[in-house]
Amino acid sequence: MNSIEIRELTKAYGTHRAVDGLTFDVLPGRVTGFLGPNGAGKSTTMRLLLGLDWATSGTATIGGRRFTDFPDPLHQVGALLDAQAAHGGRTAREHLRFLAAADRIPMRRVDEVLEQTGIASAAGRRVKSFSLGMRQRLGIAAALLGDPGVLLLDEPANGLDPEGIIWIRELMRGLAAEGRTVLVSSHLMSETSAFADHLVVLGNGRLLADTSMEEFIDARSTPRVRLRTSDPVRLRAALARDGFELVTADDGRWTVEGIRADQVGSLAAREGVPVLELSDDRASLEQAYLDLTADHAQFAATR
């Protein structure tokens, strides 16, 4: 199985614990967003998982095995941790061919991933001439090279233009739909909300949340409905009988606190009140995330 298993994982640097007793799983078939303020321990956790650093205690395994125990690791795990890692003097094709040869990957995969990531036309150019967005695409190509069941991507949308952001979003969701495990670290809340099914949130090296996107937002949102109606007087009276208040919103619509859209719709239908527009007004991922992590940020500006 391609699941990632983190068990009581701790990494200490002297008296500072960059990762502190983490336990969570990352399961196949969904995109898991890996969130947390700067210094929360996300990059350290990924490095420990890839054997780039040693844990003080605990384990980080993939399908029950350590990354360093795989005889052909690129066939099992693809990772993008640093888009600047490719040697600037090599061409994109040379960089990928070197990786393929080191892990016994068929050379045909080099051209396949160059096409898949949209940089085939630049395959003969030296990496030092690439923009940040092109380096990101090359890093993603390297992660896909071994056709792995597990993908670890750190800020994969960094430097991408709008078309590239849409592309990486669809790519990640497509990989998860194929049954792969996809763990994505990002600071872009709007993008994370567009691609992630599940969230793992860290703060000061500790686990703050491990839940679905919907549950994460709902747990930090007060139910509220936004609507339009041609008969606000009757709707206000009907809502008042059930203990709710119809309030004018800034945009000319109406809002009701403490109730869901399906409840308002049922009430309006029962009373025969026409409703022209009706939707739940939930908190955004960004609002929910800031609410959870406000006390865990190492660096915050004063106002």
Image: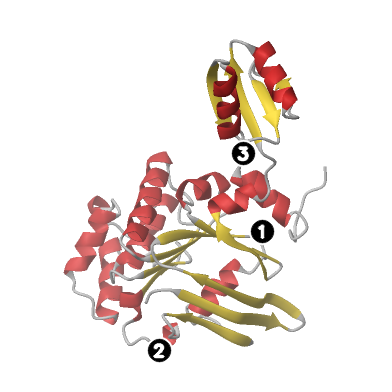
The N terminus: image quadrant: bottom left
Q: Is residue 94 left or right of residue 21?
A: left
Q: CA separation, marks 1 and 3?
A: 23 Å
Residue farthest along the front direction in this orientation: 270
Q: Which residue is mark 3?
A: 282
Residue 210 lies in what quarter of the image? bottom right
Q: Which residue is mark 2?
A: 69
Residue at 26 percent across and 58 percent down: it is 114
Q: Is 125 above or below relative to 218? A: below
Q: How is the image coloured?
A: secondary structure
Nearer the observer, 230 or 210: 230
Nearer the observer, 83 or 250: 250
Q: Is residue 88 left or right of residue 241?
A: left
Residue at 51 percent across and 80 percent down: it is 52
Q: CA separation, marks 1 and 2?
A: 31 Å
Residue farthest along the left direction in this orientation: 108
Nearer the observer, 138 or 75: 75
Residue at 44 percent across and 84 percent down: it is 64
Q: Is residue 213 left or right of residue 182?
A: right
Residue at 68 percent across and 48 percent down: it is 220
Find residue 36 and report its horizontal and vertical position in percent: 63, 60
Find residue 28 and report its horizontal and vertical position in percent: 40, 67
Q: Which residue is mark 1?
A: 37
Q: Earlier in the sequence, mark 1 or mark 3?
A: 1
For disc 3, the neighbor class at 10 Å (few under 14, some 14 to 19, many from 20) is: some
Q: Are marks 1 and 3 in contact (CB under 8 Å)?
A: no
Q: Earlier in the sequence, mark 2 or mark 3?
A: 2
